[in-house]
Amino acid sequence: MKRHQRLVEYFITVGIEFESVAPINDDSISNPIRALRIVSEKECVPDGYERITTTVTGRDASLTKKGMMNRSSRHYLCYTRDPDIDQQHNSLFTRVQYVRVKDVAADWTKVPGPIMNGKTEYRLCTKNDHSMPPVADICLITMDGKESCPAGYFELGFTINALAICLRLLPMDALDLRYQTCILDRYPRTDYANSPLSNTVAVFCQPSGADIRLQPSMPTFLSFVLTDSEGRKMYAITVTFYDKLEEDEEHHCKRALELHYTEGFRPAWPDKEKSPRQLYHSKSVCILSYYPFFLSFREALKEIYRLANSPGKIPIERYIINLCEETPLPIPSKCTVRLLYAHKPIVFRIPNEDELPLLDSNIKKIFCCLHLSNVLRLFKFLMTQKYKILFTSSHVSLITEICEGLTSFMQPFEWQFTYVPVLPYSVFGILDAPVPVLVGMHSSRLRPDFYSDPEKELIIVDLDNNTLHVPPHCESIEVPPHIYKSLKADLKLYAKADKVELFDKESIKFV
């Protein structure tokens, strides 16, 4: 493959274009759940309803077991988002309870379909509490400790057949919304002929969209990989920070909400008369390169961000030009490049042809998220290049480094199919492609059908919980036992893979 001649292709700024600001179009926001119903497996699902047959990890989601309703069939929860269906029971609701039928209060609506517990009839009931926002999504989890409430959901305080119902509510506050992003600025201003800059890169810099908040958070880093039509990989490292929201920018946001939510429920904008506080909006700067210097570029962005927020006579644009135009590309075995923005130099080195390929990332994180046995099992599926593999975490910054590390283990082979370690919310349809894919996404975007849909054959790697979900019909490569045993022993000896402590809920926050 032809060697690219620049260390950095583009340096871009990404954020909200306030004159055309708009919330990300989430179907669950514009179409909340309007009614529930319990239906037997022997009955047809009513028109417009969808049946929940599995829990969040693909286990049976039957609300009844044999004998509970004096019959052998299983019963499932169904829901609809259609406002024109089942008018008798169709209305927005915010609360759900499970009580004996004789205890149902007058202001609650009974969900069609009784549940018999022995000789006592119970009912699910719903109510629209105007102090709470409507329901955006619903799912079920088992209560045996093997499943947990998904990120962004909350668990209701009752169980049915050892299952709990979890709800995700619509954002009641406009500050809980996510906004569309775009490229605000870039260097150079014009495209290189052999590597044009795609406008879609903005959604990868902020894969969940831009946000507005009351308190600015510390800068966060994210790496991702783009693949063009010729199969060339472009690597990116992004730092996201928060700028003050100006008065005219706030006016544009309010106007966008009025246009986007024309009827029904509308998230409320903070009332500054009651609480006059400064607001902040997210913004990202990103380095794009054909060379995966993830750690080195991260250090460069740290220094550029520090310099931009420090008093000095040199404009920040001068440092950007220096990085993009004046910093040469390292030459294998001849030239190593050192940047000196602070006291510690930032080193760029390209390996020689007789060395392992460039891997400028921390592969230790693989074993901090997955036990050695899970890593080896996953690797055997990865080598088949036959299945869709989905990495998920509540800390998206982990995913690219782990994907890069795992695919580097495939040397001298390469992953040949679609590779998107950080998948923006707007392009989730890629999981429906009829070809193998290797992708990653925030855990809050997981849907129950990812586990249960047999056509997807989706292997799900949960980095937060050290779990690997493999559909029953997926087959891995066969590794001779003596080679497998030797590989496992080498990883323990040289990589100390069995000694690495797994991330816990606290330590994972600081990766």
Image: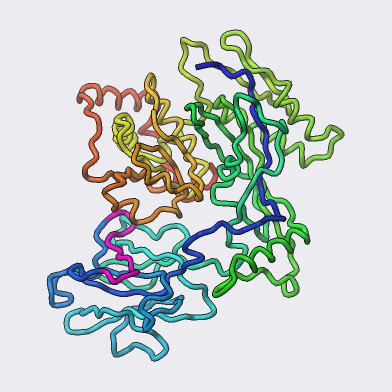
Any magenta on residue 49? yes
Residue visible at 37% across and 46% down? 432
Is 10 located above or below residue 20 in the figure?
Answer: above
Give the percent coordinates (x, y) of residue 457. 29, 44
Residue 150, quarter of picture = bottom left
Where residue 181 appears, x then y in whole percent? 62, 49
User: Would residue 186 be counted in the magenta stretch?
Assistant: no
Q: In the image, residue 292 lies at what x, y percent?
A: 54, 27
Q: Is residue 486 above or below residue 168?
A: above
- Given residues 366 and 499, the one toward you in this image is 366
Majority SS type along the magenta span: loop
Which corner quadrant of the image does residue 413 belong to?
top left
Identify the residue at the far right of this view: 313
Residue 179 can be seen, yes or no: yes
Q: Look at 67% across and 19% down and name the residue there.
A: 338
The residue lying at 31 percent from left, 51 percent from top is 451
Residue sitting at 39 percent across and 60 percent down? 149
Q: Which residues are magenta?
A: 45-58
Q: Front-most of 222 and 187?
A: 187
Q: Quadrant of residue 447?
A: bottom left
In this rendering, the count of numbered labels is 0
Name the side, left or right, on which 415 lies relative to 427.
left
Left or right position of 154 against 117: right
Q: Horizontally, is 261 left or right of 154 in the view?
A: right
